[in-house]
Amino acid sequence: MAIRRTNNSYTNAQGVSTVETFGVGSTVRVWSDYAQVWSDQWAQTTFASYWDNDLEALQTLEFVDSAEVDATPEVLEKVKAKLYAQALDKALEDAKAKALEIADGSIVEVKKGRQSKGVVGKVVVKIVRPYRMGYRSTAMTKLGIATSEAKVKVAGRNGKVYENYKDVVWAWVCNCELLQVPDIDMEEVKDRAQTQAKYQFDRVAPNPQPRRQGA
């Protein structure tokens, strides 16, 4: 028996208590923490998480009477696989979103706006400036877009000489469209997912010497 929890129900002022058992052979973690009892009341109790084969997911119970870690190696492998699959989906989603961001070096076309519409070039500068919308303004990124590779030397205030792009137009990022979406590095995505999955597993991994907790 891995997890025992008492459920109380009331019918016609008569209390009925039943004890349920969960996670036999699949309880992966037992710990103590605070749980909300009422809207403004919290109490310390015992939590336990177990692998649910039907749902193919980890489930967490609170206010358990007793619990014991007893997950088999096969169950732990299922937990690892699930955590990795979830981490891979998230890492791939993040990578796709990042690939669509306009960054330094991105090739863009100015699609809207009163100036530079139709210009295609490389983003070489990004600054944040107030963007007016009627009577209001909000901070927004403005892009410096180089239309050629020509450069000129410019003296800075610190006395140093810098090379700046010669032919640059400015446009708000909201008026620009990314023309070349970079490829996603799947190996990097998998490595990131593996790291995240390991971190998550370490948080739910059972104690090498599980101790019985609760009543």
Image (cartoon, rainbow, N blue to C red):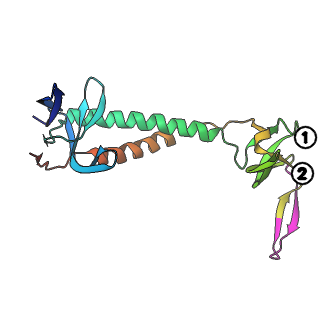
Nearest to the observer: residue 86 or residue 163: 86
Residue for badge 1? 114
Relative to 35, say whether 97 is above or below: above
Q: Is residue 128 left or right of residue 32?
A: right
Mark 2 residue element: loop
Q: Position of residue 194 (x, y in %)?
A: 40, 42
Mark 2: amino acid: Asp
Task: List the single residue furthest toward the bottom.
Answer: 159
When asked about the image quadrant of residue 120, the answer is top right
Which of the two labelled residues, at mark 2 and mark 1, occupies the earlier sequence position?
1
Mark 1 residue element: loop
Q: Is residue 152 visible?
A: yes
- Circle nearer the viewer, 2 or 1: 1
- Residue at screen point 17% across, 49% down: 208
Task: List the single residue furthest toward the top.
Answer: 54
When asked about the image quadrant of residue 53, the answer is top left
Q: Which residues are magenta?
A: 149-162
Q: Is residue 6 left or right of residue 183?
A: left
Nearest to the observer: residue 30 or residue 210: 30
Nearest to the observer: residue 109 or residue 64: 64
Mark 1: amino acid: Arg
- Label 2, label 1: how many angstroms apart (C-alpha)? 19 Å
Q: Is residue 185 visible?
A: no
Nearest to the observer: residue 83 or residue 27: 27
Q: Is residue 53 left or right of residue 16?
A: right
Q: Is residue 123 left or right of residue 63?
A: right
Instruction: Tell me the number on the disc at residue 167.
Output: 2
Relative to 194, say whether 127 is above or below: below
Crowd band around label 2 with a 10 angstrom C-alpha radius: few (<14), some (14–19), many (20+): some
